[in-house]
Amino acid sequence: MEKMVKDPFDVFFRKKPALMLVALKRSVKARYGSILAKEVDCTYSHAVKILQGLEKLGLVTFEKKGRIKLIKLTKKGTEISDHIESIKELLG
C-alpha cells in the first residue's frame, strides 16, 4: 500500500529545519530559541538540536546577550531560506 504525502514540501525537506530558516528570515531582529520552537511547533530541546546543526552548516549564528542566546541568519542562511520559500511556493 502506498503512503500518500500530505504536503509535497515534505518530500524534499525536513520540515522543522526548513521552517526555522524561513521564520528567522521573516523576522527583522534576532530571535530566541524558545520563540522559534513555538513558531515551528517543536520542543525547545528539539529546536536547539536543529539550530546547532544549522550553525555547523554556517546558516545561523548565536549571539550571547547575558543569559540569552539570540539567533541570526548568516548570508548563506538567508540565501538558502530564499530558495526554500521559492520551492514552497512552486509546490503550492
Image (cartoon, helix red, strand yellow):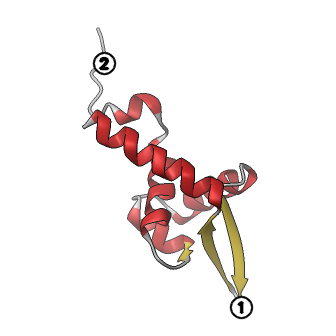
Precedes in sequence: disc 1 or disc 2: 2
Q: Where residue 20 is drawn, which disc sits there?
A: none
Q: Where residue 3 is drawn, which disc sits there?
A: 2
Between residues 25 and 8, which one lies in front from this camera angle?
25
x%, y% of residue 7? 29, 35
x%, y% of residue 43? 49, 61
Between residues 45 and 85, which one lies in front from this camera angle?
85
Instruction: Identify the secondary structure beneath mark 1.
Output: loop
x%, y% of residue 23? 44, 62
Between residues 54 and 86, which one lies in front from this camera angle?
86
Q: Where residue 66 is drawn, which disc sits there?
A: 1
In this image, 30 relative to 65: left or right?
left
The residue shown at (39%, 59%) is 41
The residue shown at (45%, 30%) is 12
Between residues 44 and 51, which one lies in front from this camera angle?
51
Residue 27 appearing in the image: yes
In this image, 3 relative to 58: left or right?
left
Quadrant hosting residue 38: bottom left
Query: Quick one: quadrant of the N terminus?
Result: top left
In this image, 31 relative to 62: left or right?
left
